[in-house]
Image (tube, grey):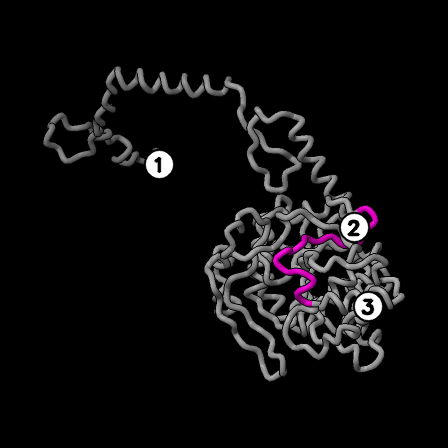
Amino acid sequence: MSSSSYLPSRSSTTHRRAPQPSPNPNSTGPQSLELDQAPTPKPVFQFIAFGLIIFLGLLQFLPATHFRDPSDPFRKWVPFNTSLSKLRSSSDAKAGLINSNGQEDGMVHIVSWMECLDLRLLAVLINSTLSSSRYPDLLHFHFFVPKGNEDKVSFYKLKVLFPHSNLDIFGQEEVKEVIRTTIVGEKHSVQNFAEIAPFIIPSVHQLLSKFIYISPIVIVKWRVEELTGVDLSNYAIAAAEDCSKRLNTYVNPDVLDAIQRSASKPWVSETPYAKNCCMPDLNVVLIDGSKLEKDFLEAFLWWTQVLNWRERSNGRNPAVALALYNRYLKLSNPWLVKDSTSFVFNESLSIHYDGPKIVCSEFGDGDTLEPGHGNLWRQHLPPMSDQIIGS
């Protein structure tokens, strides 16, 4: 019996050779693609590129010409030819400014009082002051307006225009209340609080012991912080003289002589008054409340009563000038605020606002818009002001 064994047969595919590429160039099989080589640049361009690289490399070995002063808040580029003494003096000037303010926070406080709120005037005042300042980050604005903190909308509008500025809004009632409580009798009524309020603010707001008062109708052209460096000595107030306005224009000289001879008040001059003396300009005033006489408000009210000024509806009240007579430091003429139409307004450090403004009605029946008489104010109006605060 023969045995049989099962041998699996190999599949025919295992013996099949791999297909050979057809030598026929017309064959439809896969072919290798030959790419063209990049064109060789001309030698002249190679030479220029190489020379440019060498030139840029050599520039790295040149000495630096500018640097940024770390004490400058704006990080401006300063040329290296600036002497070290100048840089130190700049840093020392800022440190001296902070130390001369008499404030613990080292800020330059700017105060303004506005009977009728006009955001356009405040915007021009803020912008002109900041743009003229060397250290705008040290300026702090304090505005006394009728509604004060209750008028949040006005505050936010100003913050939108000046997001990086330091500003506060206060009410006027506290200051007015101090004046009212000092008044004894109806004869001492005060109609214009703006002329006396700056001198009462230090007694109401203790943090504002030393500040610069700037009227809202002023366009600043100078570094306002420099005014804090003025040596007041024993004076509490510093202001420029306005010789376009004389004392004898507002007060009868004979009446003033009679008062001077008969009255025995501490604020009355012991010597005869100079009848043609210049009036103080109260648009820009440096005030140190720690040196201010305690009887200043009483002196102002007394002069107002003696001169019967409450019965006069027009004209400037000379009571402040008489209360300040020989009791304030006279600043140099450039500190005097001049009109934009003046021939010497370029020599002034500040000018009067020449645009439209809201004027309070004397009878309390609403405010009126007084038209402007110039276009200089537009140069200091921030962009988008018309859209934010209204035209």
Q: Is residue 257 above or below residue 73?
A: below
Name the front one of labels 2 and 3. 3
Left or right: residue 12 versus residue 326 is left
- Residue 3 shown left or right of residue 141 in the figure: left
Q: Secondary structure at mark 3?
A: helix
Foreground pick, 29 / 246: 246
Q: Secondary structure at mark 2?
A: loop
Q: Quadrant of the N terminus?
A: top left
Callout 3 touching callout 1 (CB < 8 Å): no
Amino acid at dot 1:
Tyr
Amino acid at dot 3 = Ile
Residue 246 counted in the magenta span: yes
Q: Is residue 302 visible?
A: yes
Q: Residues within 10 Å of mark 1 (few under 14, many from 20)?
A: few
* 206, 282: nearer the viewer: 282
> Would you say 23 lies left or right of 9 here?
left
N-term-proximal mark, 2 vs 1: 1
Res 242 → quadrant: bottom right
Residue drawn at x 50%, y 18% is 62
Magenta-colored span: 233-250
The residue under the point 81% across, 71% down is: 302
Mark drawn on residue 379: none
- Residue at which label 1 appears: 6
Which residue does the numbered mark 2 point to in the structure image?
Answer: 103
Residue 313, x across and y down, in percent: 65, 77
Per the image, is 361 magenta?
A: no
- Which quadrant of the structure image shows residue 259? bottom right
Q: CA distance from mark 2 to mark 3?
A: 40 Å
CA–CA distance in space, label 3 to label 1 = 150 Å
Instruction: Indicate which disc residue 259 carries.
Output: 3
Residue located 35% across and 17% down the image = 50
The residue sitting at the front extreme is 254
